[in-house]
Image: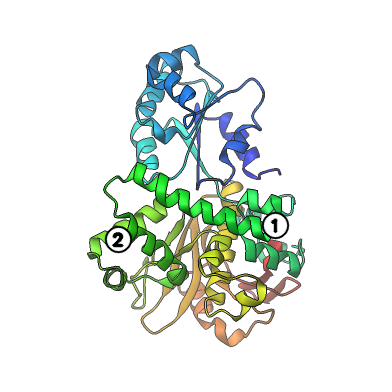
Amino acid sequence: MKRHALPLLNELLGLFPCVALVGVRQCGKTTLLKELSPDWKILDLEKLADLDAVQRDPDLFLRLNPRQLAIDECQLLPAMFAALRVAIDSQRNEPGRFVITGSSSPELLSSISESLAGRIAIIEMAPLSLAEAYELAPSPLYRLIEERAPLSQFSALLPRVSLDQINTYWMQGGYPEPWVKGQPRFRKLWLQNYLQTYLDRDLPRLFPALDRQKFRLFVQMLAQLSGSIINYSEVARALGVSQPTARDYFHIAHGTFLWRHLPPYEKDATKRVVKHPKGYLRDSGLLHYLLHLRDQDDLMAHPRMGQSWESTVIETLLRGLASAGVDASPYHYRTGAGAEIDLVLEGEFGLLPVEINHSSRVDTRSLRALRDFVTERNCRYGIVINNNETVRQLDDKLICLPFSVL
């Protein structure tokens, strides 16, 4: 299955000496490495033979392999980052020499930024997006956002998948292996073992002092917190830990790409803004597994259905922008008076507020907060995403997009 990040990887290899692929375990980083040309040498540091070959003398190994070298799970050998810096600086102007991958390590990006700043480009990968799952070309939506296109161009977008396909993707999430197998029993057992490996192997290796039992309870709690405003004090009391420990747990979950942290948008605030962060489990299939939802009927009847849909839309948007190489910082917005916007994106394209609704109809009276935000911050426009069948321009600065155009 073709990944939309491949053209971006090839582009960055033509510009930078080294490219890093980071993301949650089992999202397809290693598979993407196999799309490189056959001239590339690929090492997996989870294999003892490969790890042993490198760790004896990383500097010497890189002198013997000065280009077209890919190193999988690079975070398992911290000394590699300093060695890469030396190797890159020896031929600083030569692009496309190294690719590294990493997962399940909050310290990974800090190691990259400390040792390889200015020498490396970073691609954050995720499980399959909606378009990748159905083997479609990337949606033109993300380029329209990047290019700050007028709303008239958004109106030309067409639905790309059916409602049944959307519901299937929403229900089972985007992890590639369960998606390709397409068997509900396999997906359940795969997710069960995936979580077990995350809790019993990955975390103890990265955080030896972590209370695994408390963190296991915390992961279960994340399913109920997904899509909600986070109050660290309440989470700490529920777990029986200190507030700093609860914050650390969220930092670990975000740093291992299991959870997405959404800070509040506080810039240029003209009203009192709720300053608590928001967050959600990144993969809807994992969320539904933790909520013990068996099928679409269970999902539609569940009280967390709205939050699940909202997080699926947000994650789909962010995955599409990342694959297109569009830099976007996500936030949520809520005022003390209760006005709320589900997602605020900030990037070179400006400020883009997004309201999310599962229904196919738009109650224009419910869009006051979105209109006020667009007006107060002079945004080019705001977007509403729902399950309508066609694109509808609501007024001169608001447009309604079906989720299927994503």
Question: Quick one: SS at disc 2?
Answer: helix
Q: Which residue in the protein does label 2 denote? A: 247
Q: Is residue 199 left or right of residue 293?
A: left
Q: CA distance from mark 1 to mark 2?
A: 37 Å
Whether residue 95 is situated above or below residue 167 in the rendered picture: above
Q: Badge 1: few (under 14), some or many (20 or more) residues near its Cα, within 10 Å?
A: few
Q: Residue furthest bottom?
A: 365
12 to the left or right of 182: left
Q: Position of residue 2 (x, y in %)?
A: 70, 43
**Amino acid found under the numbered disc labelled 2:** Arg
Q: Is residue 384 visible?
A: yes
Question: Which quadrant holds residue 80?
Answer: top left
55 vs 338: above or below? above
Q: Amino acid at mark 1?
A: Gln
Q: Which residue is mark 1?
A: 183
Image quadrant where one finds the N terminus: top right
Residue 371 x/y as whole percent: 53, 78
Residue at 50%, 15% (x, y): give it: 65
Of residues 378 and 219, the one nearer the viewer is 219
Rendering coords of residue 117 (x, y %): 38, 34
Quadrant containing the C terminus in the rendered view: bottom right
Residues 55 and 138: in front is: 55
Which of the two discs, 1 and 2, labels the residue nearer the N terminus? 1
Residue 164 occupies quadrant: bottom right
Q: Which residue is depicted at the point 64% across and 48% down?
A: 177
Q: Is residue 369 left or right of residue 404?
A: left
